[in-house]
Image (cartoon, helix red, strand yellow):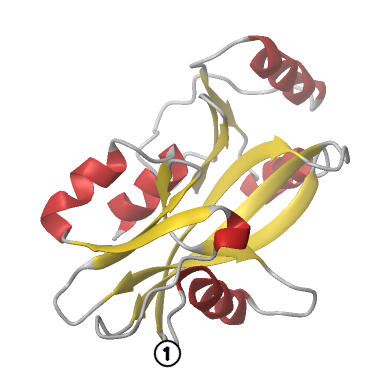
Amino acid sequence: MELTIYFDSNSLILTDCKNTNNSVPTSNWKCFSDIDSILQNFLHCSNMVYVLFHSDFQELLNEIKIRFLYIEAAGGVVENETSEILCIMRRGVWDLPKGKCNKHETPQDAAVREVMEETGLSKVQLGNYICSTWHTYEHPKGKGQVLKQTYWYRMKASKSDTLLPEAQEQITAAEWISISNISQIKACTFPSIVDVFNAL
């Protein structure tokens, strides 16, 4: 298994080298304190990619998670009847609708709720799970570094439904984008969102 955690412009790839494209690890930790030094390097460097290998993938992921405030979120790749994808503009960057899961809420329910809240859609049909993405950021209320896992799902909605971007979430636009123009969205979005598009 393999996953990438994004730290702004830096990337940490976790892998057990099973069923992945990364057949040769570039680093094999000998103790978990190695993780702390890697994270420290990320604070002072940019555009770094570090691959961390361990045969027990879940143990490795757990060691990463305990160093952060872990939050689950969910979102959707919404497609209409003409095969266009619904994208939003948030803080000047293209994005896909998503948000944090509420307590006791399943990722599927959270994904549908967040898509409807952020885009104004009144009806969304939930489809299959696509993938999960991972990224970190500084908690806005000073609670330290957050590690967010976002679950992504395919969805269907009608193009005739009225779109109303959620201004409270600093969303300034919600637009149906043709598949042929997705490359333009990829050029002005986050690496994790590019991963979602690539997983479709």
Work out whether 114 lies above or below 62: below
- Residue 135 occupies which quadrant of the picture? top right
Residue occupying the point 74% across, 73% down? 102
Q: Which one is in front, 14 or 187?
A: 187
Residue 126, given in percent of the width and then of the height, sits at: 43, 84
Q: Is residue 30 above or below residue 142?
A: above
Q: Is residue 91 above or below residue 113?
A: above
Residue 63: tell me if it is visible: yes
* Residue at 49 percent of width and 72 percent of height: 115
At a point 62% along the width and 60% down the height, the residue shown is 168
Q: Point out residue 108 in the picture as x, y percentages from the top left corner.
A: 56, 79
Q: Check disc 1 and report the residue beneath it.
A: 123
Classify the position of the C terminus by image quarter.
bottom left
Q: Residue at x 30, y 63 (%)?
A: 175
> Residue 173 falls in which quadrant of the image?
bottom left
Crowdedness near tag 1: few (<14), some (14–19) or many (≥20) residues, C-alpha within 10 Å: few
Give 80 or 18, whichever is nearer the viewer: 80
Pick the front one: 185 or 134: 185
Does 157 sit left or right of 1 as displayed? left
Amino acid of disc 1? Lys
